[in-house]
Image (cartoon, rainbow, N blue to C red):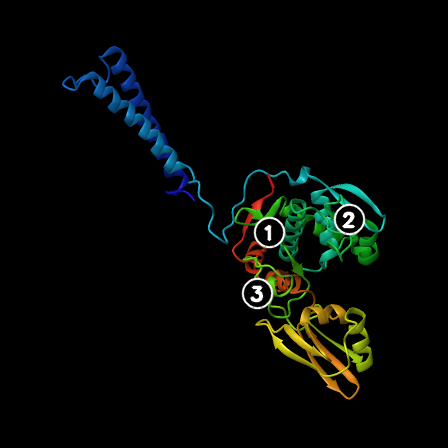
Amino acid sequence: MPLWNPTPFIKNLVGFLLQIICILFLYASYTYGMAKNGFFKKFKNIPDRRLYVILTTAAVFGCFLLSVLLHPAVLPPPPGDIRILPETASEDRIITVYDHKLCKTVEQPLEDYVFHALAGEMFASYEPEALKAQACAIRTYVVYKMEHGGCGKYAGADVCTDFASCLAYSRDDEMRMKWGDKTEEYSAKMRKAASDTLGEIITYEGEPINALFHSNAGGETEDVQNVFGGNLAYLKGVISCETADSYKYETEVTFAKEEFFNKLCAQYPDVQSGEICILSRYESGRVETMQAGNLTLSGVKVRAALGLNSAHFDVSVTGDTVVFNVIGYGHGVGLSQAGAQEMATEGFDYKAILMHYYTGVVLERFSDF
């Protein structure tokens, strides 16, 4: 940030005066050094060489002072700051996308992919600021993928259209099918959210982040270490403000006890019927460990094996029936789409939403990433 940050008028005035002073010193230095009858001839008692050095040094120092006062210091922005760089090249960047329905890799402008993925990931009825936050997360996710080997499932592609591997993606015909006579309106709304954030990506310590997101946090997001492993300072658990009527905030799933163990057996053949109970939870309320017969499994593994909406659940066993009451939808790490919608409804802009869900990040324009 600038060491001195006055109003534009004062800055221009001081800059003009400093330039005049520097020019006068340079002129005096030149005329005295070359002709010995210049602007400072009255200092006849000072040796020529010393006066020449003094005048030249003053001119150089004046130029240095001018640059320090009027230009930003080369310092990293503080965590959570917003630094929008003037350059952007994202609209010109072509990425490779594997279309899992057409079974082929195609080239596509990055910003066009952001639009189609946004249409696949978010409800068109959501607030514009929530859509903008998601657009930034999608763009950042793609750039991060490009820097880390691309799509892990389809070799040679930066990303794919398979939501199980990368992100949800809506083609034009799919938009028409789900939006019907509102296709034009909703499509324009999605494109505006993408264009209003053109080129903006989320970074931490100068690098694009792994911008994970999910549908509904159920009141609190989860530390990435508890779900995917690793310790990323920007993916920590935070309070999230979903309401009980938000999309898939709460669901109930019922299994017969035999069905419950059969589903676990498909993933863990050594499982045997027995006690079913929760052993421990994380601070967010999500299940850390659970007793399932003779096995102790993580909440993440139980969720995957049973197809539950999240690892934030309660379980009750009555006779031969096992009932799961599940809170939230998705892995719970990073941006909550339902939480972003609620924040936008309450008046927060997309920058505030991103700063809340991704700890200590900076918002920058895509340029050299």
Cα–Cα gap, marks 1 and 3: 16 Å
Q: Residue at the spot x=82%, y=51% of the render? A: 100
- Mark 1, other Cα within 10 Å: few <14 / some 14–19 / many ≥20: many
Cα–Cα gap, marks 1 and 2: 22 Å
Instruction: Tell me the kind of residue under disc 3.
Output: Gly
**Is residue 311 at all visible to an observer of this figure?**
no
Disc 1 or 2, which lies upstream in sequence?
A: 2
Instruction: Tell me the kind of residue under disc 2.
Output: Tyr
Q: Quadrant of the N terminus?
A: top left
Q: Where 281 falls versus 240 (above or below)?
A: below
**Is residue 356 at all visible to an observer of this figure?**
yes
Instruction: Report the label total.
Output: 3
Please tell me the numbered disc located at residue 209. Answer: 1
SS for callout 3? loop
Q: Residue furthest top?
A: 35
Q: Which residue is mark 3?
A: 237
